[in-house]
Amino acid sequence: MTRATIANARILEGETGPGILRDLLLGEGRILRISPAGSRAPEGEMLDAAGARAAPGYVDIHTHGGAGADLMDADGEGLGRIARFHLSNGTTTILATTLTAPLDRIRAALDTVRAYRGGGARIAGVHMEGPFLSPANAGAQEKRFLRAPDAEARDFVAANADILRRVTIAPELPGALELIAECAARGIGVSAGHDASVDDEISAAVDKGLSCVTHIYCCSSTISRRTGPRKHLGLTEIGMADPRLAVEVIADGRHVPDALFRLILKAKGRDAVCLVSDSIRVAGMPDGEYRLGDPGTEVRVRKDGDEASVPDLGVYAGSVMPLGAMVRRLVAGGAASLEDAVHMAAAVPARLAGLSDRGRIAEGTLADINLLAEDGSVLRTFLGGRIA
């Protein structure tokens, strides 16, 4: 059995309390023991953390791609580039995320994830974002491939329940409640987003198992008058107010400015805010023109610095920023403490993905660990107890 010891680390948060130097014994891919620094002889290879913060590896439940590749390419080599890109930025687990496309193209992407045996971040399953979305709030998703969550959609989800961990649905669509119930029965998490729903429809969806808002303030419905003078709350307001709902946040300073992020954190509390990259193939790439998602797409994306937009639509296409960079910028800008930012990038997404064996530093959890500087920069990443 191969063992290793991370010595003189400060556990960012957890049962041991922050700030106290600890030694972490790693083996069999897990954290075997946490003990006071120097209280036991180190076992195996020893790395001196020299007081760096030991934090759980980040968990990204909404990422489409990076390093020039997209899940919708349905290409194993490209999926490997995505997984390695995220691991190099401190993300140790991802849910590879699809885009709106014909079901056969989505199936090809799911099959690619099933067959993947390469390196990089762990791929814990798939987040299916579309095609069950509203044409009124599609953002960069291709409207021509949107469809209602009908019986065929329920059959598709049932047939792929082995790989699906989360599905984004617009709650107002005909058949949405039935699909949400189908997902809940199979242990698949459901988020709402890219919608035109109102309060009554959202409440009914929550009753059926809706648990999260997909990238809140980004294509989530807001206050409206659907018919007549009565105002209805939309998904944005319900997401902010309903304690049963967690909210994804793209904390890149573009999709959600820091002032708005502070408001979200104050309203929801850190246990209900889930940082997501929503990264696309342009993440980690030079500025220029790129394709969004599916090989047959007509959507073209322009990367310019820290932004990726669809010039033809005047909207963002997704982000260019992995979770490690988001944590660092939130801390640098004072929008969140290091402890809260890491919690929202690890513990909350792990919970939403149903992954109880990661997202925190504790004995028995996976040895997926980031050593962090005080400013949140990732100094070293361990995956299963091995240096990544």
Image (cartoon, rainbow, N blue to C red):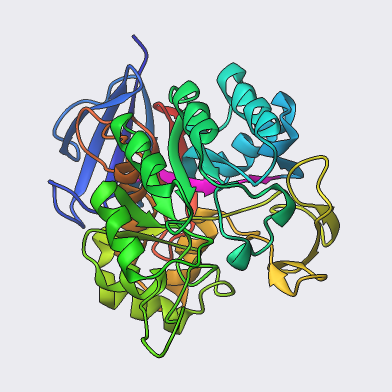
Whether residue 51 is visible to the viewer of this picture, yes or no, is no
Tell which of 350 and 188 is nearer to you.
188
Eyeballing the image, is 299 above or below 31? below
Percent of width and height locating residue 115: 60, 17
Percent of width and height locating residue 300: 83, 58
* Residue in the picture at 24% in, 52% down: 207
Farthest residue in the top direction? 1
* Residue in the picture at 49% in, 44% down: 91
Magenta residues (range): 56-66
* Residue in the picture at 45% in, 81% down: 227
* Residue in the picture at 30% in, 25% down: 30
Residue 59 shown in magenta: yes
Percent of width and height locating residue 316: 67, 68
Eyeballing the image, is 10 above or below 118? below
Residue 8 shown in magenta: no
Name which quarter of the figure residue 134 lies in.
Answer: bottom right
On the rendered image, what quadrant is the N terminus found in? top left
Tell which of 179 and 298 is nearer to you.
179
Eyeballing the image, is 263 above or below 302? below
Whether residue 174 is visible to the viewer of this picture, yes or no, is yes
Tell which of 152 and 227 is nearer to you.
227
